[in-house]
Image: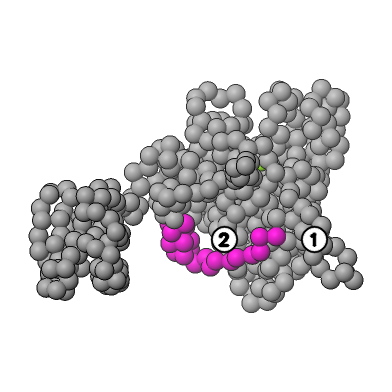
Amino acid sequence: MTLLKAVRGTRDLLPPETDLWNRIEATTRRVFARYNFGEIRTPIFEDTSLFARGVGEETDIVSKEMYTWEDRARAQSEKAQSLTLRPENTAGVVRAYIEHKLGESGLLQKLYYIGPQFRRERPQKGRYRQFWQIGAEVIGPPSAGSESPLRDAEVLEMLASFLDELGITGWTLVLNSVGSSTDRPKYIAALREALAPVKDQMSADNQRRAETNPLRVLDSKDPADEAIIATLPKIADYLDDASKAHFAAVLAALDACGVQYEINPRLVRGLDYYTRTTFEFTVGGLSPQRAGAPGTPILGAQNALLGGGRYDGLSEMLGGPKAPGIGFAMGLDRLILTLQAQAASAPEKSAPAFADAFIAPLGEHLNAPALTLARELRRAGLRIELGDGAFRLKKSFEIGNKLARAIILLGEDEQASGILTVKNFATGEQTKIPASELAQALQNR
Ligand code: ATP
Ligand code: MG
């Protein structure tokens, strides 16, 4: 029989690596709470048209990476519905914002999420078909200040603090402005014009994009097209005064609080909904242009830890009220790879992989008392491994030595007297401790 394996591009996360996942998630919740974000959990699958409308038909995600199916498990009288595993979470959050009329409070909504996303991409280091994102959105009616450049700067400052607190070193914040719905069309027209005479020399993907969505050409990762792309007009020259002022205010606020950044005029990001500020945090010494740089990148060909930007028109694109917003999505898998590669001396240590004690019942009739003892110690907050009365003493010692700092022997004498025998593996010291003092004694070790 052929063995079943996890599907290509998906993988199991096992201990002790999951300790690191938990630590990152705990740091996320702690840091984001300081900025007064609350958690949102949206469904893993949504109506396909949410992504088609929200993310954009001509994006890589929608045109070739989505897991979509016709859902036929509905009543026979009803038509099948096209559903999609979420490839990203911003569209779902904005759908929820509209559906639950969150804007009616008149306040800014500050929402974060942690969860799996799905894209049918070619699996490689740092790129999977099921991957995890940590993301956040700040969205609300304009009267709540949702359009203010201060929101952008605050989100970027939060990310800088988050990465620092996590212990990630050597990150770079790369920023750009892609303009508003009024100035962007002018730039796109200029881009189309500049592409017309040269597009035939480009890759098939870029030839198509040059026609359908020229902005996406800038986002291309095809090294062969780099030379042509470098000659194309820059969006900074097409921003109107309002967009320019907005971007300048974001930069000024970052300067004021000491968050460093680089500007990359080509950073337009892969999703259609972005307006004004767009950004990525990269790591690994590769240039933000993504190609041609020397060195061994931590994340393989992927150097973006996270990406995000402003999406002032997204709510309206989805049929909702005017609700400007800014958000980001961070690749949790890539945070893990980076922390592992940097062997981060993080300020907060992960939980020890060792148990505080291994309980060895000396005979099967002592299994139930051993469970009772384990229950008491665990309730006192200790990490306990429970052996088995069927094990011989030698085996209990061997297993205990692998898993725990100490072994507690529970034989008939101990059961009768209520005084346990405890051996510390590191020191070899063996002591008798009354059951009532055991938790205290183990805690003090
Ligand atoms: P990339 O340029 O690496 O393809 P992207 O622009 O498609 O990234 P976004 O859609 O903005 O990425 O997602 C935000 C973050 O999610 C990325 O910066 C990355 O860290 C992570 N991410 C995206 N796709 C994957 C994937 N297939 N596997 C692992 N992480 C991913
Ligand atoms: Mg991608």
Side of 399 relative to 255 (left or right): left
User: In the rendered image of this protein, does residue 253 appear above or below residue 280?
Assistant: below
Query: Of the residues shown, which amino acid type is indicated by label 2?
Result: Tyr
Residue 25 sits inside the magenta stretch: yes
In terms of image quadrants, where is residue 113?
bottom right
Side of 420 relative to 108 (left or right): left
Residue 404 in percent (x, y) is at 26, 53
The segment highlighted magenta reads 24-45
Residue 331 sits inside the magenta stretch: no
Q: Given the current orientation, which residue lies at the most extreme bottom position?
A: 105
> How many numbered dots are placed on residues in this image?
2
Label 1, on which residue? 71
Q: Residues within 10 Å of mark 2 (few under 14, many from 20)?
A: many
User: In the rendered image of this protein, does residue 208 appear above or below residue 420?
Assistant: above
**Quadrant of the rendering where the N terminus is positioned:** top right
- Whether the residue under disc 1 has CB within 8 Å of ligand 1: no
Query: Of the residues shown, which amino acid type is indicated by label 1?
Result: Asp
Residue closer to the observer: 106 or 349: 349
> Residue visible at 88% across and 65% down?
79
Label 2, on which residue? 113
